[in-house]
Amino acid sequence: MVKVWIKRQNVSKMVAVASLLLVLLAVVLLVMRRETANYSNPGGPFFEGSYAGEVGNFDGSLRVVTWNLHHGEKLEQAIETLEDAPELRDADILLLQEIDVEGVEAIAQKLHYNYVYYTAFFHPRFKKEFGNAILTKWPLSNPDKIVLPMLFPAGWKAE
């Protein structure tokens, strides 16, 4: 009779522990979902800066450079390339993806661009926010963020 009581007591403890673990797992999943969510508010987070000097008259040609900086990695190399490569140097418009606000600020200051930047998402592995930037030698006005319907699913992990 005592053995049966001990087994039932152990089963009750195991059920209690399993229930606690399930609750903890649910909390972790909810936190992960919040961390990996896109920033879907059209108003921001938003940043801007002005570092361009005087701009000459528009000559009818426009050179646009777009670059996915893959989580802002190798920023110094990217700046050197933008300075040194003839095809990229002094582009009229730079469109940068997967960059953080500090990276945009560094490029804009070093290369003398004005910029607007919207944070798009928080990356849980890098523990940083990344987004998209438009940099140009001309003044920028009336920026807008258009939220596209494709969102990263909960638990998304980029490698």
Image: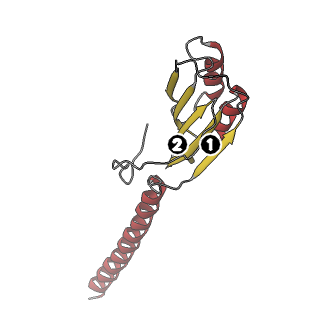
Where's the N terminus, which quadrant?
Answer: bottom left
Few, some or many C-alpha atoms within 10 Å of disc 2 (few <14, some 14-19, many ≥20)?
Answer: many
Which residue shows up at 66% across the image and 19% down it? 80
- Residue 28 drawn above or below residue 79: below
- Residue 89 drawn above or below residue 75: above
Question: What kind of residue is marked 1?
Answer: Val
Q: Where residue 37 is drawn, which disc sits there?
A: none
Which residue shows up at 26% across the image and 84% down it? 4
Q: Which one is nearer the viewer's eye here, 6 or 130?
A: 130
Q: Are marks 2 and 1 in contact (CB under 8 Å)?
A: yes
Residue 37 on image: x %, y %: 44, 54
User: On the rendered structure, is 84 left or right of 126?
Assistant: right
Few, some or many C-alpha atoms within 10 Å of disc 1 (few <14, some 14-19, many ≥20)?
Answer: many
User: On the rendered structure, is 81 left or right of 20?
Assistant: right
Give the Cα separation between the discs numbered 2 and 1. Answer: 8 Å
- Residue 10 drawn above or below residue 123: below
Q: Which one is nearer the viewer's eye here, 108 or 50?
A: 50
User: On the rendered structure, is 72 left or right of 107?
Assistant: left
Which residue shows up at 54% across the image and 54% down it? 44
Question: What kind of residue is marked 2?
Answer: Gly
Q: Where residue 131 is drawn, which disc sits there?
A: 2
Where's the C terminus, which quadrant?
Answer: top left
Q: Secondary structure at mark 1?
A: helix
Spot the residue most to the bottom.
Answer: 1
Residue 118 on image: x %, y %: 54, 46
Q: Which one is nearer the viewer's eye here, 67 or 122?
A: 67
Residue 157 on image: x %, y %: 42, 44
User: How many marks are shown on the rendered structure?
Assistant: 2
Which residue shows up at 63% across the image and 19% down it? 90
Question: Which residue position is annotated with label 1?
Answer: 101
Q: Earlier in the sequence, mark 2 or mark 1?
A: 1
Residue 11 on image: x %, y %: 31, 77
